[in-house]
């Protein structure tokens, strides 16, 4: 892929009409959540938001301090908003850090915590919290090129996630999972039966690099172009995304929470 520019993505964030389009579902039985970047941002979140997400999904180095997480919980409570802590895929070092964080937050339990690592589920449950299976656990086929498929049979296949596998779904239930979280790929999605379902908007996760990227080095967000892809690829930290501002999945039903991310996660 070719790097075409390097800039902050705030200009492309889901503000204005896109945010308004997302928030309209608050009156249609869909819980609207905002993934907040800082505790201060919670105090100024728009009307219509019912829940705050705080934390990180992809890089254990971004697990928040106990002070920041507590401030986010208290800011959410001050706005009468429910709270969800997002946790990333982790090494042993990240696991130890998460354990320390949840011990420090024990006075605020119970609240939701999203696990993007199977090892985090037991830690979350042991802390008396409510585990949610994050989008790194609920594998999807998110390649934007799949939207060009003509075969209905293939399109239906690629809309499914790991939670549609009976054995995997049974494992999740055995682990106390009642909610799973999904991306909104261009090829569409089929929300799995038997779970509450969250949908992330507008950034669709594609892949995670195990090597240090330029974005990790300088903290910027990069747009990457390739003629084989119908959309720009966004490099944020070690993760790659693209934007999908369509919300056909909500109109089709099966999703009861929309997680709005104003900026690409890291």
Image (spheres, rainbow, N blue to C red):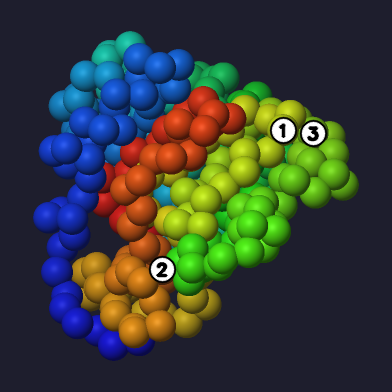
Residue 180 screen position, x and y as percent: 62, 38
Image mark for residue 193: 1
Quadrant location, the C terminus: bottom left
The residue located at (49%, 68%) in the rendering is: 148
Does label 1 or label 2 sit earlier along the sequence?
1
Q: CA distance from mark 1 to mark 2?
A: 28 Å
Can you say whether 116 is above or below 112 in the image? below
Q: Which mark is residue 240?
A: 2
Q: Name the residue beneath numbered marker 3.
A: 173
Left or right: 30, with 135 as reference point: left
Q: Residue at x 34, y 83 (%)?
A: 226
Circle 3/circle 2 CB separation < 8 Å = no
Quarter where residue 264 is shown: bottom left
Along the line of sight, the residue nearer the viewer: 245 or 112? 245
Of residues 230 and 136, the one nearer the viewer is: 230
Within-10-Å neighbours for mark 2: few <14, some 14–19, many 20+: many
* Left or right for 240, reference 180: left
Q: Quadrant of the N terminus?
A: bottom left
Of marks 1 and 3, which one's residue comes earlier in the chain? Answer: 3
| Element class at badge 3 | helix
């Amino acid at each position: 892929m070719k790097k075409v520019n390097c800039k902050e993505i705030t200009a492309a964030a889901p503000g204005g009409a896109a945010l308004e389009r997302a928030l309209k579902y608050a009156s249609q039985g869909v819980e609207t959540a905002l993934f907040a970047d800082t505790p201060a941002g919670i105090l100024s979140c728009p009307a219509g938001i019912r829940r705050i997400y705080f934390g990180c999904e992809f890089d254990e180095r971004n697990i928040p301090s106990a002070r920041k997480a507590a401030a986010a919980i208290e800011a959410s409570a001050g706005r009468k908003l429910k709270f969800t802590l997002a946790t990333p895929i982790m090494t042993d070092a990240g696991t130890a850090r998460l354990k320390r964080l949840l011990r420090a937050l024990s006075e605020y339990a119970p609240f939701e915590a999203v696990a993007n690592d199977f090892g985090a589920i037991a830690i979350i449950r042991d802390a008396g919290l409510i585990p949610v299976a994050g989008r790194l656990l609920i594998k999807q086929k998110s390649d934007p090129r799949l939207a060009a498929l003509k075969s209905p049979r293939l399109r239906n296949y690629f809309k499914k996630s790991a939670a549609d596998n009976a054995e995997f779904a049974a494992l999740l239930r055995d682990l106390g999972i009642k909610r799973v979280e999904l991306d909104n790929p261009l090829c569409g999605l089929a929300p799995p039966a038997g779970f509450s379902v969250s949908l992330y908007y507008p950034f669709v996760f594609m892949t995670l690099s195990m090597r240090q990227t330029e974005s990790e080095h300088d903290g910027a967000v990069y747009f990457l172009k390739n003629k084989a892809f119908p959309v720009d690829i966004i490099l944020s930290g070690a993760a790659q995304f693209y934007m999908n501002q369509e919300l056909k999945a909500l109109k089709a039903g099966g999703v009861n929470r929309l997680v709005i991310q104003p900026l690409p996660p890291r």
